[in-house]
Amino acid sequence: MKQFLYGLALFIFLVLPPVANLMESIMIIHMHMQMPMLIAAGFLMAKYFQHRFPSFFQKWNPDGVPGILLFLVVFGYWMIPRTMDEALTFQAMEWFKFISLTFLAGVPLRDSWKKLSKSFKYAIFMFFAILFVAMGWLYIAVPVQLCNNYLLVDQLTLGWGFLTMAICIIIYLIYITFTDQSEYESE
């Protein structure tokens, strides 16, 4: 129950208008801080929903694949520059961002992650590394503004942030490939 309260407190903090406006005023903070924190809030709240509705999660997400696909679809949707722009323009779209990232991405992520095989988890990390390289290249290489609410320099900063995240994921993948992970796993 404590995790649910922490997740709910984080969610409430992130939707407060001064906090939301501050985080959305800088493009890289909007994409690389606010959105992952909303997913983390849902991740923390998921345990309560798993205990409250165990048959729903067992029936709907028995092996973790449907939940992780829902997470990937929602996360991918919010990677589109137009949707991020609309979240700043339309209040309803902003609320959809808060709800979808928290409850349609964070909750299924927690329910699915332990159910997935190691090879599937590695494939997801590789997918994110490729996605982040592509998004970084897009935001850096395109000479025009992709989001009307941000300056071109914000777009370049976000592009370099995506490339940095991709490099970190690749380093992590190399690390787990060349180290014996059984030493670190508890039984």
Image: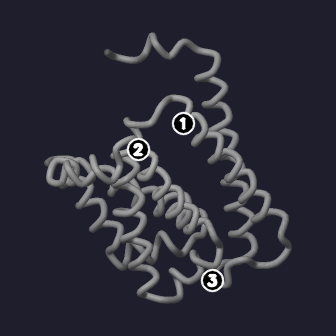
Residue 93 vertical placement versus 57 (above, below): below
- What is the x, y in percent for residue 80? 63, 70
Q: Nearer the viewer, residue 1 or 59?
A: 59
63 relative to 119 in the view: left or right: left
Q: Earlier in the sequence, mark 2 or mark 3?
A: 2
What residue appears at the point 56 percent right and 83 percent down from the top-left corner?
86
**Mark 1 belongs to which amino acid?**
Phe
Measured Cα–Cα span from mark 1 to mark 2? 10 Å
Q: Colour scheme in the image?
A: one colour
Looking at the image, do the residues carrying marks 2 and 3 touch, with CB atoms under 8 Å apart? no
- The amino acid type found where label 3 is placed reads Asn
Element type where label 1 sits in the image: helix
Question: Compared to 14, does 107 lie above or below?
Answer: above
Residue that mark 2 sits on: 64
**Quadrant hosting residue 149:** bottom right
Name the residue type under label 2.
Gly
Which one is earlier in the sequence, the residue at label 3 or at label 1?
Answer: 1
The mark tally for this picture is 3
Percent coordinates x, y for residue 76 in the rendering:
58, 62
- The answer to which quarter of the image holds residue 183 is top left
Look at the numbered discs 1 and 2 and tell me whether their residues touch, using CB distance below 8 Å.
yes
Q: Which residue is tagged 3?
A: 149
